[in-house]
Image (cartoon, grey):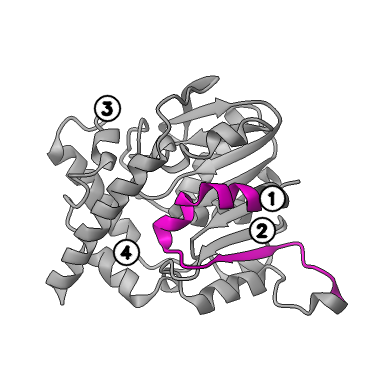
Amino acid sequence: MKNALISAALVISSFISLKSTAQESPSLKPDTAGYAPVNGLKLYYEIYGEGKPLVLIHGAYQTIQLCWGGMISELKKTRKVIALELPGHGHTVDIDRPFSYTAFSDDVAALLKYIGVNKADVMGFSIGGTTAMQLAVRHPEAVDRLIVLSAPYQYTGWLPVMRNMLQSLPPGFLDQTPYKAAHAGIYKDSTAFHQFTAKFIRFDTEDFDLGDANIKNIKAPVLFIMGDNDGVDITHKAKMYQLCGGNVFSDMAGHPKSQLAVLPNTGHVDVIMQADKVLELAGQFLK
């Protein structure tokens, strides 16, 4: 069983490699880029365009380009896009601190304060989506509207097969993908990169729960964009939406402030790859 899971993980990493290469946009150049001194970190960020701020939080092992390269060029036409790289990712060197959604959300809040943004819309994919929810819980004053792409608020929101796969990942599972190359600037060799992936695998397989009451008390309207088969349990998708005010008879009660979109024939990585669909849904929600 373990060998089968490892094989599946390696197949997935190859799949991610092909998808991520297609997602990158080499011509993308930020208007501003820098490092924010927050919480002991030098957190890397990029800013594109002008307008109402929109924060982008990438998924595990990703960078700004690998996650959002297919969307920023469109988003920046009408928004001030603030994209960041979480600790240990891309240009942001990790520090001697455990990975946690609490720490990640506090880092994002501190970044916004550093660049003088009081409130923003926030969109996150996978662990970035969970971080975005935690940001709305811990720093509600910083979040106007929230978009969560294929992410749970509890570890058990992932299907058992997803949790088992995450636990079976070897540190070198990304060695033949663009993910490793994208981190070459902060990891001097494979050993250093594997130390990061091993640390992140441990984090990615730890039990977590943002709390039913906390999700229910999120003040910001939330748009959940999920795949029908993205590894997040379908009952968990429904529960998240219900906690945020969904699952009503809107013909009588009116439409709730939050929304749920389930994309058909769509896996986890597929969600972020459907840039046109995500942009369409996000554009309607953020109006």
Q: Give whichever of 60, 212 is nearer the camera.
A: 60
Position of 34 compared to 141: left or right? Answer: left
User: Above or below — where is 90 with respect to 135?
Assistant: above
Foreground disc of the pair 4, 2: 2
Q: Earlier in the sequence, mark 3 or mark 2?
A: 3
As for residue 279 lying within the magenta part, the answer is yes
Q: Secondary structure at mark 3?
A: loop
Give how far across and how far down residue 168 sits, in percent. Answer: 20, 65
Q: Are marks 1 and 2 in contact (CB under 8 Å)?
A: yes
Q: Amino acid at mark 2?
A: Val
Q: Earlier in the sequence, mark 4 or mark 1?
A: 1
Tell me what residue is drawn at x 24 percent, y 52 percent.
14
Q: Which residues are magenta?
A: 253-281
Position of 106 compared to 184: left or right? Answer: right
Question: Label 3 belongs to which residue?
Answer: 185
Q: Earlier in the sequence, mark 1 or mark 2?
A: 1
Q: Residues within 10 Å of mark 4 (few under 14, many from 20)?
A: some
Give how far across and how far down residue 283 sits, in percent. Answer: 68, 46
Q: Amino acid at mark 1?
A: Arg
Q: Secondary structure at mark 1?
A: strand
Question: Label 1 belongs to which residue?
Answer: 145
Position of 236 compared to 165: left or right? Answer: right
**Label of residue 129 in the image:** none
- Alpha-carbon distance for marks 3 and 2? 35 Å
Quadrant location of the N terminus in the rendered image:
bottom left
Q: Secondary structure at mark 2?
A: strand
**Label of residue 222 in the image:** 2
Q: Are marks 3 and 1 in contact (CB under 8 Å)?
A: no
Question: Label 4 belongs to which residue?
Answer: 205
Tell me what residue is drawn at x 17 percent, y 65 percent.
6
Q: Are marks 4 and 2 in contact (CB under 8 Å)?
A: no
